Image (cartoon, rainbow, N blue to C red):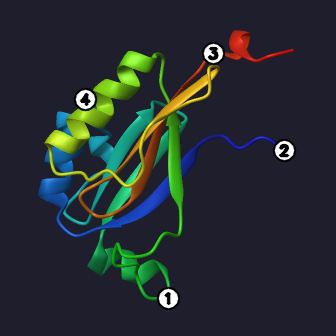
């Protein structure tokens, strides 16, 4: 089986601040799927998106309590084209209100760094170079 695309749905406290945060990191939004209840963050056009949904609207999709940022339910890992871009995104995130929850790691063939966004969602930004994997 093959899925057509993926949407990771995450609750957020303030859509305006969330839009500003991700815009400063260099990301864009699909305005067709964004409104006063949710933002559609484009991670890879046509393939991967994150729906950043106000707490009020998010609660209409579940019968469970919404995580308050003090627990971890999901780690979202995204791969980018270079180590430099990993560092740039994490640096921009930290400068714009994110927090560090783990130090960067370099495994030779894989380099990654991490941050928790302004709503406490944990993101791992990674670069891989399969040619560096030991045979």
Q: Which mark is residue 129?
A: 3
Q: Which mark is residue 99?
A: none
* Percent position of residue 10, x then y: 41, 63
Q: CA distance from mark 3 to mark 1?
A: 40 Å
User: In the rendered structure, which disc, 1 or 4, sits on the residue that comes first in sequence?
Assistant: 4
* For marks 4 and 2 on the same chain, the one whose residue lies earlier in the sequence: 2
Q: Position of residue 111 (x, y in %)?
A: 53, 27
| Label 2 vs 3, first from the N-terminus | 2
User: Does dot 4 land on a helix, a strand or a loop?
Assistant: loop
Q: Quadrant of residue 69?
A: bottom left
Q: CA distance from mark 2 to mark 1?
A: 29 Å
**Is residue 108 placed above or below 68 in the rendered structure?**
above
Please tell me whether mark 2 or mark 3 is closer to you in this view: 3
Q: Secondary structure at mark 1?
A: loop
The residue that disc 4 covers is: 26
Q: Is residue 61 left or right of residue 18?
A: right
Q: Tell me, yes or no, whether the two marked residues, 1 and 4, touch with CB atoms within 8 Å.
A: no
Crowd band around label 2 with a 10 angstrom C-alpha radius: few (<14), some (14–19), many (20+): few
Q: Determine the residue positioned at 33% across, 65% down.
A: 53
Q: Which mark is residue 64?
A: 1
Q: Which of the two discs, 4 and 2, sits closer to the camera?
A: 4
Of the numbered discs 2 and 1, the one sitting upstream in the chain is 2
Mark 4 nearby-residue class (10 Å; few <14, some 14–19, many ≥20): few
Pick whichever of labels 4 and 3 is earlier in the sequence.
Answer: 4
Q: Which residue is painted at 24% across and 51% down in the image?
A: 98
> Between marks 4 and 2, how big is the CA–CA gap?
32 Å
Q: Which residue is mark 2?
A: 1
In whole angstroms, how far apart are the C-alphas of marks 4 and 3? 23 Å
Badge 1: how crowded within 10 Å, few (<14), some, or many (20+)? few
Q: Quadrant of residue 43?
A: top left
């Amino acid at each position: 089986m093959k899925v057509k695309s993926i949407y990771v749905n995450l609750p957020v406290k303030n859509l305006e601040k969330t839009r500003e945060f991700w815009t400063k990191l260099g990301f864009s939004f699909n305005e067709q799927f964004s409104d006063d209840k949710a933002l559609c963050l484009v991670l890879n056009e046509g393939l991967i998106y994150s729906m950043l949904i106000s707490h009020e609207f998010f609660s209409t999709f579940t019968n469970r309590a919404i995580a308050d940022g003090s627990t971890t339910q999901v780690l979202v890992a995204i791969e980018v084209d270079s180590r430099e871009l990993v560092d740039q995104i994490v640096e921009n995130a930290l400068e714009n209100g994110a927090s560090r929850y783990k130090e960067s790691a370099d495994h030779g063939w894989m380099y990654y760094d991490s941050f928790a966004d302004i709503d406490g969602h944990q993101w791992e930004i990674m670069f891989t170079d399969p040619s560096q994997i030991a045979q």
